[in-house]
Image (cartoon, helix red, strand yellow):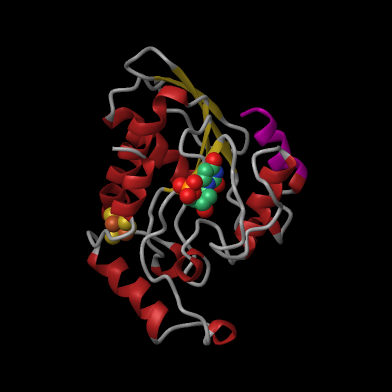
Amino acid sequence: DDVAELDARVSVCRACPRLVAWREAVATTGRRAAFADQPYWGRPGPGFGDPRPRVLVVGLAPAANGTNRTGRMFTGDRSGDWIYAALYRAGYASQPTSTSAADGLELRGARIVAAVRCAPPGNKPTPEERATCGQWLDRDLELVAPGLRSMLALGAIGWDAALASARRLGWAVPRPRPRFGHGAEAVLVTPAGHEVRLLGSYHVSQQNTFTGKLTEKMLDEVLARL
Ligand code: DU
Ligand code: SF4
């Protein structure tokens, strides 16, 4: 049981009927005009990156025309431009861009997953969908925990998912429950007594990056603390 096997299992998951219907509808009849001539992935986004990461990045969910098109996390959309450029600046990525699953990008020391692994309508998964998909994050955390130093939660949903998984796995989580914010930090302790730092960043979505709520400098400062 390793991350490659986990990713293979995730990528055929059909546990959430509404999300299965949406991901497949977008991939067939709902393609964006600019991509109408491309095959869409139309399945859950498997984890991407180093199979033995020191850093686990936890995003929100695939974009309908991003990961749901290309099959790689944060690939083919504006959010991805931001996170991969930052990972490159911080030394985790072999190139600053991620344009397709075949572009040769590799991550060293980092793996990227999402709280919810299928594209949700309006980028809004339901509480039930978040809870269901949290089981995949549990498996990810269990597998990578021995070598893990920190997690980077992009947005409050990633933050909540990381804390919920840690709790389910019996990790010590501070009380009161750590609150999400840009630059927020919490130290979690695995049952093996190993500390994992959880850091929060505003999500790299356009609504934050276009408006200046999240700047490259702000993102770089959080990555430097991983
Ligand atoms: O074939 P593979 O080495 O298991 O890699 C699968 C996939 O993961 C490929 O797109 C490269 C990527 N990857 C990575 O980004 N960083 C690593 O350290 C190892 C693999
Ligand atoms: Fe499966 Fe997660 Fe997709 Fe739901 S969101 S179908 S649990 S991969």
Residue drawn at the location 40% of the way across and 70% of the way down: 121
Q: Is residue 25 left or right of residue 96?
A: left
Q: Quadrant of the N terminus?
A: top left
Nearer to us in this view, 80 or 72: 72
How many tags in the picture?
0
Magenta stretch contains residue 218 = yes
- Give above or below for 39 relative to 75: below
Q: Is residue 127 visible?
A: no
Nearer to us in this view, 49 or 116: 49
Residue drawn at the location 36% of the way across and 50% of the way down: 7
Q: Position of residue 75 (x, y in %)?
A: 56, 61
Magenta stretch contains residue 74 = no
Q: Position of residue 182 (x, y in %)?
A: 61, 38
Q: Position of residue 88 (x, y in %)?
A: 70, 45
Q: Quadrant of the C terminus?
A: top right
Q: Residue furthest top?
A: 193
Q: Is residue 38 visible?
A: yes
The segment highlighted magenta reads 217-226
Residue drawn at the location 38% of the way across and 12% of the way down: 193
Nearer to us in this view, 148 or 64: 148
Judged by its main secondary structure, the magenta piece is helix
